[in-house]
């Protein structure tokens, strides 16, 4: 005669069987991959150089910039980045608080206690100078490598080379001597861009003559008498908020200012080497040639 199993006992046996199968499946299931480190998913960069900040944003890494200097004002999105001090008076504590994966700064700043603490945490350090076009090229390349944006950096360098070719001789005259140019970058006293400055090198590339040619200083101070003696064909205002400079120079007898051979403002990108610098220099070369040709100096003034 068939023995019937009580319903309660049957349910208990089924529960045990299901639990056994579940445990067996768990034992043979493939191990789950460990979660990626947060820094690998969203790496964190601190820039202690305005030039580097511009490059990081131009390479598409702006969202990863978690620290910048008070001078990092371009692009405008960089103004939202937490400040870590200036380019020389860096707050070590502010940098460390951002837990950066990469820190970019000048060799002078990336030294001492800051380097010791960052190196201990495994942070990658990228020391760079930005004083010449070659420095700019090197900076783009090394930043691209440091943040795994080699393709973007290569594209940026290709564009830069193309722009440099466009700038070459851009403000040259078809005949005669080159346009004599004076660029003023400071006021009280007057500070001018020397031949050895980055701005001086841009003027050389565009094919004009910098009247500060004989001075070996990068940005020497000049008197109004020196400006008059240099007899520039064109004067450039390389400052922000100096709208009365032309009238001041004209009042001092500077012929270029009196005759309107004066560039009242420049693209701020030319004031420090960065991704948009050469484009700004092309604009400036066109402006120099335009104001010169609109009212060329007389032979007496030119001499």
Image (spheres, rainbow, N blue to C red):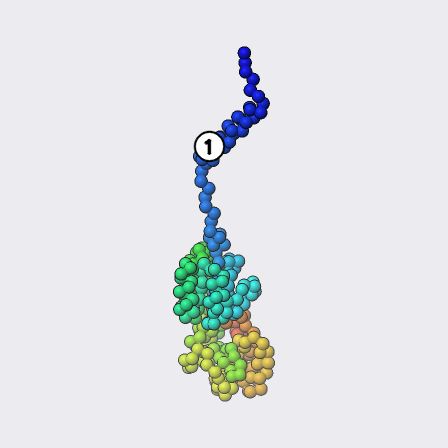
| Residue 198, picture quadrant | bottom left
Residue on which disc 1 sits: 24
Q: Which residue is drawn at 46% across and 72% down?
A: 88
Residue 234 in view:
no
Percent of width and height locating residue 290: 55, 73
Front one among 139 and 69: 69
Q: Residue at x 51, y 61 (%)?
A: 66
Q: In this view, does 123 lie above or below 4?
A: below
Residue 148 in view:
yes
Looking at the image, which residue sits at the far top? 1
Q: Which residue is drawn at 42% across and 64% down?
A: 117
Percent of width and height locating residue 287: 54, 72
Instruction: Give the quarter of the figure containing the N terminus.
Output: top right
Q: Is residue 68 above or below residue 246?
A: above
Front one among 300 and 22: 22
Front one among 119 and 279: 119
What is the crowding at mark 1: few (fewer than 14 residues within 10 Å), some, or many (at least 20)? Answer: few
Percent of width and height locating residue 59: 49, 59
| Residue 291, picture quadrant | bottom right
Q: Is residue 142 above or below residue 224?
A: above
Q: Which residue is drawn at 45% across and 56% down?
A: 149
Secondary structure found at label 1: helix
The image shows a total of numbered marks equal to 1
Percent of width and height locating residue 232: 50, 81
């Amino acid at each position: 005669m068939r023995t019937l199993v009580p319903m309660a006992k049957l349910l208990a046996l089924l529960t045990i069987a299901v639990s056994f199968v579940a445990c067996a499946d768990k034992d043979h299931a493939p191990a789950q991959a460990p979660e990626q480190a947060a820094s690998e998913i969203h790496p964190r960069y601190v820039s202690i150089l305005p030039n580097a900040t511009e490059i990081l944003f131009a390479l598409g890494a702006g969202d990863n910039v978690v620290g910048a200097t008070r001078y990092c004002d371009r692009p405008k999105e960089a103004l939202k980045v937490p400040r870590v001090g200036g380019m020389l008076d860096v707050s070590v504590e502010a940098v460390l608080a951002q837990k950066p994966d990469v820190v970019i700064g000048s060799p002078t700043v990336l030294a001492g206690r800051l380097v010791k603490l960052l190196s201990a945490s495994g942070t990658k350090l990228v020391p760079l100078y930005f004083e010449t076009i070659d420095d700019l090229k090197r900076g783009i390349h090394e930043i691209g490598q440091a943040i795994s944006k080699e393709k973007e950096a290569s594209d940026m360098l290709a564009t830069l080379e193309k722009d440099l070719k466009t700038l070459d001789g851009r403000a040259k005259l078809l005949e005669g001597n080159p346009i004599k140019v004076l660029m003023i970058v400071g006021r009280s006293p007057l500070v001018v861009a020397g031949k050895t400055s980055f701005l001086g090198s841009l003027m050389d590339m565009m094919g004009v003559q910098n009247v500060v040619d004989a001075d070996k200083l990068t940005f020497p101070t000049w008197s109004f008498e020196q400006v008059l003696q240099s007899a520039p064909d064109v004067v450039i205002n390389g400052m922000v908020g100096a709208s009365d400079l032309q009238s001041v120079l004209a009042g001092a007898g500077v012929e270029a200012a009196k005759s309107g051979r004066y560039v009242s403002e420049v693209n701020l990108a030319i004031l420090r080497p960065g991704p948009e610098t050469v484009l700004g220099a092309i604009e400036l070369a066109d402006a120099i040639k335009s104001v010169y040709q609109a009212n060329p100096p007389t032979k007496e003034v030119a001499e």
